[in-house]
């Protein structure tokens, strides 16, 4: 099987169209189409169904794509291991974490790592969805819950809590709750139904000190923890936020400071194949230092 044609087929399957694949490969649409057609002729099977809205893999195409993806993933892993065999850490390092943790805590701190290891090209992937480390969608994941994928190495970094936060402007206008029962008189911002949070009881503020006969109604629901932080900073109301997300944000201050919400652990996770990677090791050590320097 022609490796170049297989590489083009893999890119087309990922891109969903000849045009987009051509842009990624720096080839014309017609050249990409010819290469895929030639591969289909050599295999004597149809790999794509072509229609006006794009390309759909056939059953045979799905089989070849799955195999090609595994092959290219292993090649990328081999390349990373060869790179790490050199004395000085260098090469690409893709780090995945949640939007909230990545945008508010990790990104402001990443400069120190890049300055210490200029030969490592860091790529941050911020998503609240699952990233498949075994398929090299990322090298490292910083997770807010234990990983469920097999063949992954995990290291617990630290434990974090939720507390209640409001903005100074809100406190000036509405006052500070002195007891949990006082929350009945305040505007509460909570997580929407589709929010991915590290604890199952993220909206515990709705029950804290509440009278069962007078259920509370939130002033706003938000399906993203960073959006919740911005709503708090705007002065809209009080919300339960993980402590990491308010680091460096002076417009969010604790209320009912002696009451902590549910806690959760953070994990440093990477594939077994990268156990001896120097890039993984230096980034792990960097994170451990950053966590120890942070007052949560």
Image: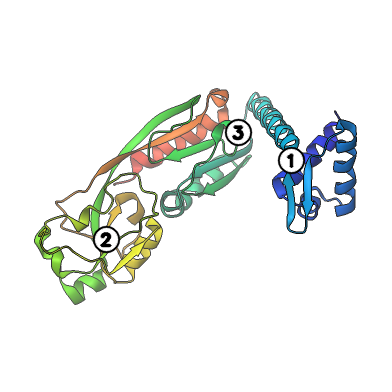
Q: Nearer the viewer, residue 171 or 200?
A: 200
Q: Going 88% across and 42% down the picture, which residue do you hit?
A: 37
Q: Nearer the viewer, mark 3 or mark 1?
A: 1
Residue 6: percent from the left, percent from the top? 80, 35
Work out whether mark 2 precedes mark 1 in sequence or the reverse, and give the earlier one.
Answer: 1
Nearest the viewer among 232 and 58 is: 58
For marks 2 and 3, give the CA distance: 37 Å
| Other residues around mark 3 within 10 Å, as few (<14) / some (14–19) / many (≥20) | some
Please name the residue that numbered disc 1 is placed on.
58
Q: Residues within 10 Å of mark 1 (few under 14, many from 20)?
A: some
Q: Position of residue 283 (x, y in %)?
A: 50, 36
* SS at circle 1: loop
- Scheme of colours in the image: rainbow
Which residue matches tag 2?
Answer: 239
* Observer able to see residue 28: no
Q: Is residue 258 above or below residue 273?
A: below
Residue at horizontal 30 percent and vertical 55 percent from the top: 241
**Which comes before the other along the chain, label 2 or label 3?**
3
* Mark 3 or mark 1: whose residue is earlier in sequence: 1
Asked if marks 2 and 1 touch (Cβ < 8 Å), the reply is no
Q: Is residue 285 above or below residue 128?
A: above
Residue 5, x across and y down, in percent: 84, 37
| Residue 111 x, y percent position in the rendering | 51, 49
Give left or right: position of 243 versus 255: right
Q: Quadrant of residue 194?
A: bottom left
Q: Element under label 3?
A: helix
Q: Which mark is residue 135?
A: 3
Residue 65, visible in the rendered structure: yes
- Give the mark toward the camera: 2 or 1: 1
Task: Please indicate whether residue 208 sits to the left or right of residue 128 in the image.
Answer: left
């Amino acid at each position: 099987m022609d490796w170049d044609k297989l590489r083009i087929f893999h890119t087309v399957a990922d891109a969903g169209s000849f045009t987009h694949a051509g842009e990624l490969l720096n080839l014309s649409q017609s050249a990409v189409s010819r290469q895929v057609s030639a591969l289909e002729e050599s295999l004597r099977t149809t790999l794509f169904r072509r229609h006006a809205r794009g390309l759909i893999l056939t059953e045979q195409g799905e089989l070849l794509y799955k195999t090609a993806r595994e092959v290219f993933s292993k090649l990328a892993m081999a390349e990373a291991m060869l790179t790490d065999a050199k004395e000085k850490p260098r090469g690409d390092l893709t780090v995945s974490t949640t939007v909230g943790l990545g945008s508010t805590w990790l990104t402001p701190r990443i400069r120190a790592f890049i300055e210490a290891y200029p030969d490592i090209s860091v790529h941050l992937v911020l998503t609240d969805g699952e990233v498949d480390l075994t398929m090299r969608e990322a090298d490292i994941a910083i997770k807010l819950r234990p990983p469920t994928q097999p063949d992954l190495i995990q290291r617990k970094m630290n434990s974090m809590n939720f507390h209640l936060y409001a903005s100074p402007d809100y406190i000036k206008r509405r006052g500070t709750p002195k007891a949990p029962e006082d929350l009945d008189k305040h505007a509460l911002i909570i997580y929407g139904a589709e929010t991915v949070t590290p604890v199952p009881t993220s909206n515990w503020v709705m029950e804290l000190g509440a009278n069962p006969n007078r259920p509370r109604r939130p002033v706003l629901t938000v399906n993203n923890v960073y959006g919740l932080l911005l709503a708090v900073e705007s002065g809209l109301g009080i919300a339960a936020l993980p402590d990491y997300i308010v680091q460096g944000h002076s417009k969010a201050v604790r209320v009912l400071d002696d009451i902590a919400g549910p806690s959760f652990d953070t994990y440093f996770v990477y594939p077994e194949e990268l156990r001896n990677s120097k890039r993984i090791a230096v980034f792990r050590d960097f994170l451990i230092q950053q966590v120890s320097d942070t007052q949560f």
